[in-house]
Amino acid sequence: MSKKRKHAHQEEEAGEAWLLPYSDLMTLLLAVFIVLFAVSKIDAKKAQQMSEEFSKTMMDKSYNAAASSGGSGGPLNIETQSELESFFGEYELRKLETLKTEIDTKLHDGNMDQSVSTMIDMRGLVIRLNNAVLFDSGSAKINKHADTLSEVAKVLNTTDNYIRIEGHTDNVPISRSSYSSNWELSTARAVNVVMYFVDECNFPPDKLMAVGYGEYKPVGDNNTEEGRSQNRRIDIIVLSSQYDNLEEHLVK
């Protein structure tokens, strides 16, 4: 009888023996899932950090980039020829450079290049005019020196790209003007340049847009007179293909 009881006890132990490796397997799987979950959380944090750093870098490059040759510093500036070619592609860059050369030549031949500069950045070709060339202080009415605009418009009318006219001011508050803020003044000036292109230069209106930035996109130091003079400007921008395609998509 005692032998039978002993044999029965051994059978019971053998029948439960599978629980040990099964328990170990479950523990191992749980550990694997915990590790995978932890790794995924770490990667997500790293991805978020990289995204934030990239965004900050692009913003800094957009509005604080140093000047490239041919003009004052400006937004979205790229400093080297290789960077420009990489961003635009060789064909588009050559097209913008040809347009820039043609405008530079016209301005130089007409002795108009003292208060006008040109540059190429990620937005496209930028023609920058000092407000003093076009407007009296506090006014949005284009003055008698509009021949500069006419010469620029003649060249730009040969391109199919969209043209964005940007109005900019310094940060000195409006005092003697019919406009209550620099923002309103800069917008009115941009609109009047657009209307001049349309009315006086037969420019297609569907290719033009007007934007007023007021004092909020400075290219110079508003603490100095020289910097404030640089900030009082009109930027005429021949939009690059990336911006051009976006505008084309928006108007459809």
Image: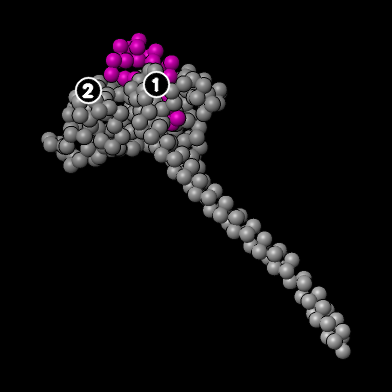
Residue in view at x 78 percent, y 76 percent: 13
**Horizontal side, residue 112 vs residue 89: left or right:** left
Q: Which residue is mark 1?
A: 68
Reply above or below: 183 against 10. Answer: above
Does the magenta run of residues contain 107? yes
Question: Which quadrant holds residue 231?
Answer: top left
Secondary structure, mark 2, is helix
Secondary structure, mark 1, is loop
**Horizontal side, residue 118 vs residue 180: left or right:** right
Res. 48 mark: none
Give the mark nearest the N terminus, 1 or 2.
Answer: 1
Q: Nearer the viewer, residue 5 or 31?
A: 5
Does the residue at mark 1 contact the one at mark 2 (Cβ under 8 Å)? Answer: no
Q: Nearer the viewer, residue 131 or 68?
A: 68
Question: Quarter of the image containing the N terminus?
Answer: bottom right
User: What segment carries the magenta color?
Assistant: 100-123
Looking at the picture, the colour scheme in use is one colour
Q: Which residue is mark 2?
A: 226
Q: Amino acid at mark 1?
A: Ser
Does the magenta run of residues contain 34? no
